Image (cartoon, rainbow, N blue to C red):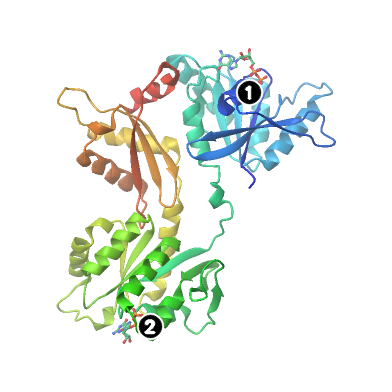
Amino acid sequence: MALPIIAIIGRPNVGKSTLVNRLAGDQTAIVHDEPGVTRDRTYRPAFWNDRDFLVVDTGGLVFNDDTEFLPLIRQQALIALREACAAIFVVDGKTGPTPADEEIAGWLRQQPVPVLLAVNKCESPEQGAMQASEFWELGLGEPYPISAIHGSGTGEILDELLVHIPAVTEVEENNEIKVAIIGRPNVGKSSLLNAFVGEERAIVSPISGTTRDSIDTVIERSGQTYRLIDTAGIRKKKHIDYGTEFFSINRAFKAIRRADVVLLVIDAEDGATEQDQKLAGRIIEEGRACIIVVNKWDAVEKDSYTIYDYEKTLEGRLHFTEWAEIIFVSAVTGQRVEKILELVSKAAEAHKRRVTTSVVNEVLTDAISWHSPPTSRGGRQGKIYYGTQVSTQPPTFALFVNDAQRFNDNYRRYIERQFRKQLGFDGTPIRLFWRSKKVRDAEIGNLNRATRVK
Ligand code: GDP
Ligand code: GDP
């Protein structure tokens, strides 16, 4: 499996090799010879959190000087960039932006890969931020103050970098949204399936690695493909005469595991039952996006029930999925059935969404200024250094704090509510991990950030 490649780019002497050494530690280099390219590129394996990648130093990229090697170096950089999923542009914080930096930045802005701007040689936390801020003018977004020699600030830039590094499982991702239709028997799952498929020919496709018994139906709406998972389980259930209930719940669990978005179908006349709560619990455990589909809305006496009242009751019973949208439909009349797919697309998007580290920290800064972290009996206060999104599906955040135990459930829920309020994420569960972190001198960059956060 090919690993994602990160290109390190910059003028000579800004500290690219030092940064590569810092990122790759002492892992040995892989040297690639390529005919026609004089300076071999060196790929160094590196990892951050749970992601592996290769860093490639592109040599000094200089545009102005007309020495004979420079076109070659530039060609090197071009090749590296073509195969890279992201680049780190290293500049020298001690010298400030130079004309060559501007020229390279101008060129980088036209490349199709995301570029992060590392302002190196920023050892001093106070001066570092100032030195870095001078580089906003390069038009490459937030400049990250780092010291490749000391290692400060590199964690933050790596956190941001992860956003652009595809996890190995995500590499083969396509745009299809996998949808599981689950619910108790007789709530209307197969009617709903028929309503989706309608007159159009259902494209039924067996999936490799599963039994023939498991069949998906693929439908399309305005260019978006939806794979309805294990529709055989929905269609065939009438013929299963042994242990239907047991069988279907396990089947439902399997479908949930394969899905991006789960439609939890509820019978409007029955409301949410204990089994529905159990299914909802499983959806959360698996970290899937979810839409609560209240079916047979046509059969409900509207005088006694308004949607509003109904929603309140339902939210009470399924309070742990308060982030899930609720939609009232009729599979039989077709009322609002198409709207379900719109909600599915929205939820799938939220499920996959990435938020930059700077936005996460803006939200944290704001949340903390309204409501400061709890203080322990000993009088020591909880401190949040910074947070970052570590993965998607579901969106997962790590919050680095002085002592995770100081953050009680109340405060954790408060932060989660703020995340949702400020960032959205409708339709998907989100996860927050609270990590205690010892701050050493080497990570003074984070402390620096923390004083801003506090
Ligand atoms: P490259 O030509 O871009 O690969 O740069 P090098 O990694 O060879 O570094 C060039 C010079 O900058 C060396 O003297 C390094 O010791 C120095 N240098 C690299 N990183 C830092 C840093 O974080 N802080 C300071 N003060 N000097 C650094
Ligand atoms: P499944 O077991 O969840 O697949 O449920 P079915 O789709 O087989 O539906 C069970 C029963 O509910 C059937 O008699 C359907 O006609 C009926 N049903 C399904 N959807 C609706 C609906 O929207 N309105 C009404 N009134 N009945 C429905």
Nearer to the camera, 345 or 234 = 234
Secondary-structure class at tag 2: loop
Tell me where residue 294 appears, x and y as whole percent.
29, 72
Amino acid on which the number 2 mark rests in the picture: Ile
Please tell me whether residue 255 is drawn above or below residue 395 in the rendered image. below
Please tell me whether residue 37 is drawn above or below residue 447 in the rendered image. below
Q: Outermost residue, front direction?
A: 242
Q: Quadrant of residue 5?
A: top right
Q: Is 230 situated left or right of 175 in this image? A: left
Which residue position holds label 2? Answer: 240
- CA gap between label 1 and label 2 equals 65 Å
Residue 343 seen in render: no
Amino acid on which the number 1 mark rests in the picture: Lys
| Image quadrant occupied by the C terminus | top left
Tell me where residue 412 appears, x and y as whole percent.
26, 40
Query: Does label 1 or label 2 sit earlier along the sequence?
Result: 1
Q: How many marks?
A: 2
Q: Residues within 10 Å of mark 1 (few under 14, many from 20)?
A: many
Cβ of mark 1 under 8 A from ligand 1: yes
Q: Is 255 situated left or right of 115 in this image? A: left
Secondary-structure class at tag 1: helix
Nearer to the camera, 285 or 432 = 285
What residue is shown at x 55% (from left), y 42% (from top)? 165
Number of the label disc, if any, that sits on residue 118: none
What residue is shown at x 33% (from left), y 70% (from top)? 249
What residue is shown at x 20% (from left), y 31% (from top)? 374
Do the residues bearing badges 1 and 2 touch, measured as CB atoms within 8 Å? no
User: In which of the image's four quarters is ligand 2 placed?
Assistant: bottom left
Tell me where residue 135 appears, x and y as whole percent.
55, 24
Of tags 1 and 2, the one toward the viewer is 2
Which residue position holds label 1? Answer: 16
